[in-house]
Image (cartoon, helix red, strand yellow):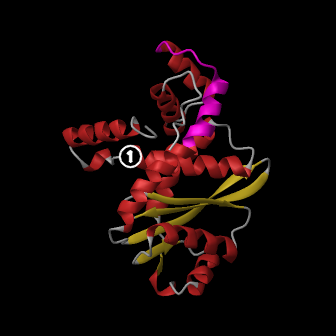
Amino acid sequence: MANPFRCFNSSPEVIRLVVMMYVKYPLSLRNVEDLLFERGIDISYETVRYWWNRFGPMFAAEIRKKRSAHMRAVTQWRWHLDKVYVKINGEMHYLWRAVDHEGEVLESYVTKTRDKAAALKFIKAAMKRYGRPKAIVTDRLRSYGAAMKEIGNADRQECGRWLNNRAENSHQPFRRRERAMLRFRRMKTLQKFSSVHASVHNHFNKERHLTNRQTFKDQRSAALAEWQTLMA
């Protein structure tokens, strides 16, 4: 595979750092520019924009490839499906998201509608990549039930008032990021960023409240070391 950094004067380490800072943290383009300048790295905020657009999907694809291969090898116990409303230029869009029982974001899919066809395409895409789970938790939107019935998965659907809190809580990092970006202006950009953000969040999210300090530090260091080797 050709080196994706070959046409750039900046080092791969700097490019990875820029993409990680912009996607992982709720920072604006100019925030990233200022923080890097304090560390002796002088680049424009437009360079930050260009690098995340060019390299973000590449990094996300490599992360997703490794994680999906691992997850297909283990039993998928339970998925939580939910959607969030995202307004683009005054028009309502829907960001469908699938989360597993451990909080891993499996799939992000943007549509203009929330009907059966949209739900079906979203569920099929998730199952194609990760296989079928033993149970799928959803809210009471009838599009889910119609889609589940068509693929023969209706007996695995679970609905309940508090059952889908896992999915509801998983929206929070994305919502914080959305506010920092002052919302989205195109559906294509929303789809790209939500997919990249989900992969980066999965990579660095170590559920620190479930482990002791030393274990968390070890896992964080391992995640950072793996990030620094992406596309190497």
Q: Which residue is labeled 1 in the image?
A: 205
- Which residue is most to the right? 90
Question: Which amino acid type is marked by label 1?
Answer: Asn
Q: Is residue 1 visible?
A: yes
- Which residue is most to the front? 2
* Element type where label 1 sits in the image: loop
Residue ID at (50%, 72%): 127
Residue ID at (56%, 21%): 9
Image vertical order of residue 133 relative to residue 146, above or below: above
Residue ID at (46%, 40%): 231
Instruction: Indicate the quadrant where residue 212 lies.
Output: top left
Residue 147 percent coordinates (x, y): 61, 80
Bounds of the magenta segment: 39-56
Instruction: Indicate the quadrant where residue 222 lies.
Output: top left
Residue ID at (52%, 53%): 171
Instruction: Indicate the quadrant where residue 220 lies.
Output: top left
Residue 97 percent coordinates (x, y): 55, 61
Q: Main secondary structure of the magenta part?
A: helix
Q: Nearer the viewer, residue 40 or 24?
A: 40
Count the labels in the image.
Answer: 1
Instruction: Report the side of 213 relative to 80 (left or right).
Output: left
Image vertical order of residue 136 relative to residue 41, above or below: below
Instruction: Report the side of 148 relative to 211 (left or right).
Output: right
